[in-house]
Image (cartoon, rainbow, N blue to C red):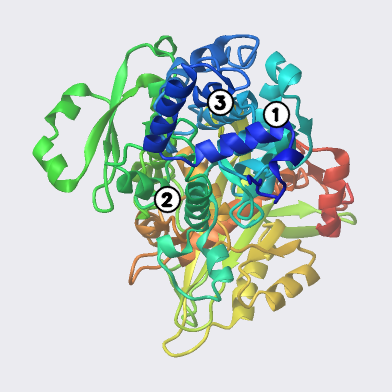
Amino acid sequence: MIFSNDGRHRSQRTKEEDRALLLQQLAELTPAQRKLVKAMLVSATNGDGDLFDYMNDNRWLRKPVSVRQFLEDPYYMGASSQTLYPRIKEDLIEMFETPAIREVVLTGSIGYGKTTFISFATCRLLYELSCLRAPQSAYGLSLGSEIVIALMSKSLHLSRQVMKSAVDDKIKLSPYFMEHFKPDFRSDNTFFPNNINLSIGSCFSERILGMNVLGGAMDEANFMVSKGQVIGKNNGKKATVAQFDLAEKMYASIVRRIKSRFLKAPQDLPGLMILASSAATIDSFTNRKIRDSQSDPSVFVRDYAAWDVKPKQNFSGEKFWVLIGNSAVHSRVIKDKAEADAVDRGWLEEQECRIIEVPIEYYDDFDRDLENGIRDIAGISTHAISAFINRISRIEDCVNKEMQHPFESLEYDYGSGAGFVWPSLCRQGERKLAGGYKEVFWQPLRNPKTARHVHIDPSLSGDSTGMAMGHIDRWVEVVRRGPDGEEYTDVAPYIVIDLMLRVNPPQGEQIFLPDIRRMVYELMDHGFHLSGFSCDSYQSAEMIQQMKAHGVHSEVVSVDRSMDAYDALKSALYERRIEFYRYDPFVTELRTLEYDKVRGKVDHPVAGTKDVADAVAGMVYALVKGARLSNVMMPDLDLETKESDSWVSNKIMVPQGSVQSVAQDLSGMPLPFIMG
């Protein structure tokens, strides 16, 4: 007696159920067993009959078209593939036409088409499933089981809005899918006939792990989680990169499940997982995966620079060269071919460095930000800990040699009695008042009508306190490159640093923070009107409370909790949008700052400092963040003749944003700044 998996006798099954059960049983045979059964059927039936048809691959309801036809034919993906780069198309064809491929690793530069590759590959997987007569039986699963294609990114939002939407949009434009495999589009799932499901997930979500995942993709795997997030989920215990890489753990778990659940599937119906991410660090997940898979024929790897994929007609043919350094050797741009050829190749090999050739069209990108150019455009991973400011020359470019340090000593040793050199900061004048009276007042030497922002990086004992004051001088146009690799123009503030100062604590004693605040009051008394005040969170509550009491909009700005502040400073340096006098403690700190990509943090080297750099970064970030309010105009005063009845004539420059948003931001401003 022959029973199905649900215990029913053969007489109780329909013909289709019989066929599905037969397919499942045949799928479980080894290749040698299948060959033997087929030979027996040929002998018994002379190559004729229903069972022989099944043995002759009757798994297919319709035979799949070639990958090239699938991509180019308007009936399938042709409407979506018109802008597909030829290199990506050929990679898709090669990958699907190589039967041994089970995993794909895509890395390198931003914007060359990794997400596009994923979307077309996902559509092909769904298409092949649609061609099967009984997908569950073909893959050795129980009848009625769900088959899942999973799309994962660092958040469900990105999985939904970037990955799944790209697949859904292509399917909607395909007549084949809409006629033969019509989907039911939902927010987190797209349901297809035969219980096939396109689903999304993230590195924090375990929703995928319990499903029958046949294949899918994980995008931006190198950027899924920061060290802080991992430590928070690891009870603060230290771990290695591999131990706390949630993306790697999730990916490995899914691949193991694919291999175990679809182990009995025929070799021509493999599961497929795609791992994609732009370059990050030397020891990032994709780099480790590539390194571990060098001799594995089942892993398909593509690692492209931006110019490797884009059509040659996009480039003039002119080149420049970049020396790719390491943790000890600084990377640099080489514009002259003779200089590039003169670099000793033996030395390069010994230092594990190299020189790459880059189309001249990318020169401005590498000139603006060398490390990001190497990583994002050349697609080369950089070291986990490296110099934060690679373009040291940019620091010198931003030094104004005519400006002077406006303090009596280079550093203020707390309690030494040193003070401000006021003639370097402001000038004294006299103005007439009503009734024939006169008043002596101070006015900043530079941009006297523009308000300033002060940021203090406080400390108590041991560490020094950093202090910085600056303002927005004007707005300038800059050229930037977006996440998709395309250039765009933007408007950004040009910042002038009026004051930088390191305050050192007494030996074995503490810095009295109210005395630091007194220095801010002195600046206000000498004509520097503040649009804002900020300090780091440590011991900041009392400082902020007192500054608010003096009518100054005050807030906490931490330079260690995120990269925002230092990114703002680095961007201003690289785009030459910041100007300051030569202050050796600040210049030294900038030269030695280190960026730990694993921790996502800027730090100083052993025995180094960054207190002044912290203060400047906090000040720059506060100005950029509140840029709509930074250009607060002071009264138009003539030092000798004009009268001033009040401060109600203030004006506020609003380069962008609505009146409503400005009104909301103004709610925290001191009264004189909102009366006008």
Residue 234 in the image, given as x and y percentages of width and height: 54, 72
- Tell me which label, 2 or 1, sits earlier in the chain: 1
What's under tag 3, amino acid-wise?
Leu
The circle drawn on residue 327 is none
**Marked residue nearer the N-terminal end (1 or 3):** 3
Q: How many marks?
A: 3
SS state under label 2: helix
Q: Residues within 10 Å of mark 2 (few under 14, many from 20)?
A: many
Residue at point 63%, 71% (across, down) = 537
- Which disc number belongs to residue 285? 2
Q: What residue is disc 3 on?
A: 51
**Spatial CA span between label 3 and label 2:** 48 Å
Q: Is residue 287 found left or right of 259 in the rendered image?
A: left
Regarding residue 536, the answer to whether it shows in the image is: yes
User: How far is mark 2 from mark 1, CA to CA?
Assistant: 28 Å
- The answer to whether residue 407 is seen in the rendering is no
Q: Nearer the viewer, mark 3 or mark 2?
A: 3
| Front-most of residues 525 and 275 | 275
Q: Which residue is mark 1?
A: 168
Viewer-closest of 3 and 17: 3
Q: Indicate which label's residue lies in the foreground, 1 or 3.
A: 3
**Residue drawn at the location 53% of the way across and 11% of the way down:** 69
Query: Which residue does the image show at 63% across and 21% down from the upper left?
Result: 61
